[in-house]
Amino acid sequence: MAEDTVSQRALRLGVAGPVGTGKSSLIATICRALAEELRLGVITNDIYTDEDARFLRSAGVLEPERIRAVETGACPHTAIRDDITANLLAAEDLERDFAPLDVVLIESGGDNLTATFSPALVDAQIFVLDVAGGGDVARKGGPGIGRADLLVVNKTDLAPYVGVDVPQMVADATAARDGRPVLALSRTDAPSVAALRAWVLEVLAAHRGGTHVPQDPGPMAPHFHADDEHPDGGYVHSHADAHADAHSHAEAGADH
Amino acid sequence: MDGGTLPAAGTVALLLADARLPSGGHAHSSGLEPALQGGMPAAQAAGFLLARARTTGLVDAATAVAARAAVLEGGPLGDVERAWAARTPSAAMRDASRELGRGLLRLAKRLWPESAALAALVTPPRPVVLGAIAAATGLPAEELVRLSVYDDLASAVAALLKLEPRDPADGALLVLAACASIEARVPEIAAVRSPHQIPALSAPQAEAWAEQHAIAPRRLFRG
Ligand SMILES: Nc1nc2c(ncn2[C@@H]2O[C@H](COP(=O)(O)OP(=O)(O)OP(=O)(O)O)[C@@H](O)[C@H]2O)c(=O)[nH]1
Ligand SMILES: [Mg+2]
């Protein structure tokens, strides 16, 4: 089916990251920077309300009808990863109602460091940290930090107030990401917003050109264990299995 | 389904009853959150489930059976859907069921692409999709009744454990007890053949709660 091929439908771009790091604001920033030249749609995943959708509608960056809220039954990470049905339906609805769209931005419900989007839902994803969460968060790693298509270190304007060394935080993040891009962003810093805009356009071009392949950041970033006996001097190891266990506990439990 | 061997109907029933089924069900509470928000004490959850089972539960189950029969015997599914809507007076409940149906249909079309009945559905409620799946997979009517009721009640209890945490084992007891409460009616519901035989079993208090919940500013679940 031609309309299902990746390069013909809108680029679906996920925005994940812990609570309050600035995901909605970043989406508003992208809309402000690109609404003139691209046809955009937004989906928010809220936990209790449609607060994020309302925030974005009131920001006036996009027609209100282009911003849809998905409710997640208290499981924001399930809705972007294990059971993406509601988000897929919302994306398909938006793409149909406003055809043709260039980019659909999907905000995850603010969750923890481990929540990332399934590559079956988004083509690319941004993981958002903020300087106020502490300079060492980037070093702690995790799938989003390690392997999202772009890691944003947000609210750099606050760095002096929270005693965070932004270049150091970016260097730590870059080291944790094997060279994948890291962007120090503040909505009040125009060059950083321009860099964000350029990144989105670059991914869109790759998506359209068929050269972009959706990646799964995975449940947990693989890491290297030094081992002198090992022929390669060590081995790369992931905690996927351990995590699967942890997750099934969470599924059975009450509060995830 | 390709690959040569078809899964047993019983396996299909297990799949459909599994909370991990990726069809969007995790955002629904089968009326449980509406009830709690409407003021029902959590201690009355057992009574809520019994009432849900013998009202909405049986209407949906009979609808699923009628849909199965319609597909197998070439009758129109539109009549089944209208009969269901007439017996589901709350618009909020109908919306919730259509949303569940849509998610389930999306998955079912992937799993059973050869089913013309599934392919023809547009915005069906959950029980109509279940009935069409049952027809496509050889699931017997009695199993379909139990599946429809179980899935609905298990969603309510999963939500209960999130909203009013308690020993999850108590939740399992609640599901089994409420399912057992309608067991004697399974043969009668499974014998439904045409839409007019779907019983009209309304639950006015739960319907009022559903309507209130649909416009509530804060909620975790869709319905
Ligand atoms: N100083 C500063 N504050 C920012 C920036 N971006 C966002 N904020 C503020 O950070 C707070 C949280 O921003 P949101 O965009 O709502 O964050 P979010 O990640 O969407 O939050 P949740 O959806 O609740 O997880 C708000 O008070 C924003 O105004 C920034 O670049 N600089
Ligand atoms: Mg937000």
Image (spheres, rainbow, N blue to C red):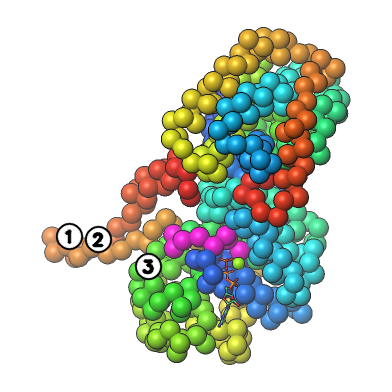
Magenta range: A107-114
Tell me, yes or no, whether the two marked residues, 2 and 1, touch with CB atoms within 8 Å. Answer: yes
Q: Position of residue B164 (x, y in %)?
A: 53, 41
Does the magenta run of residues contain A166? no
Provide the residue designation for mark 1.
A230
- Asked if residue B116 shows in the view, the reply is no
**Chain assignment, label 1:** A
Q: Quadrant of ligand 2?
A: bottom right
State the SS at label 1: loop
The residue at label 3 has a CB less than 8 Å from ligand 1: no
Q: Position of residue B142 (x, y in %)?
A: 64, 14
Q: Are marks 2 and 3 on the same chain?
A: yes
Question: Residue A99, relative to residue B7: is it above or below?
Answer: below
Provide the residue designation for mark 2.
A235
Main secondary structure type of the part rendered in magenta: loop
At x 61%, y 20%, the residue is: B146
At x 46%, y 78%, the residue is: A132
Please name the amino acid that badge 2 sits on.
Answer: Tyr
For marks 3 and 1, give the one nearer the viewer.
3
At x 40%, y 86%, the residue is: A163
Q: Position of residue B167 (x, y in %)?
A: 43, 35
Whichever of callouts 2 and 1 sits on the residue coming sooner in the sequence is 1
Question: Residue B131, relative to residue A2: is it above or below?
Answer: above
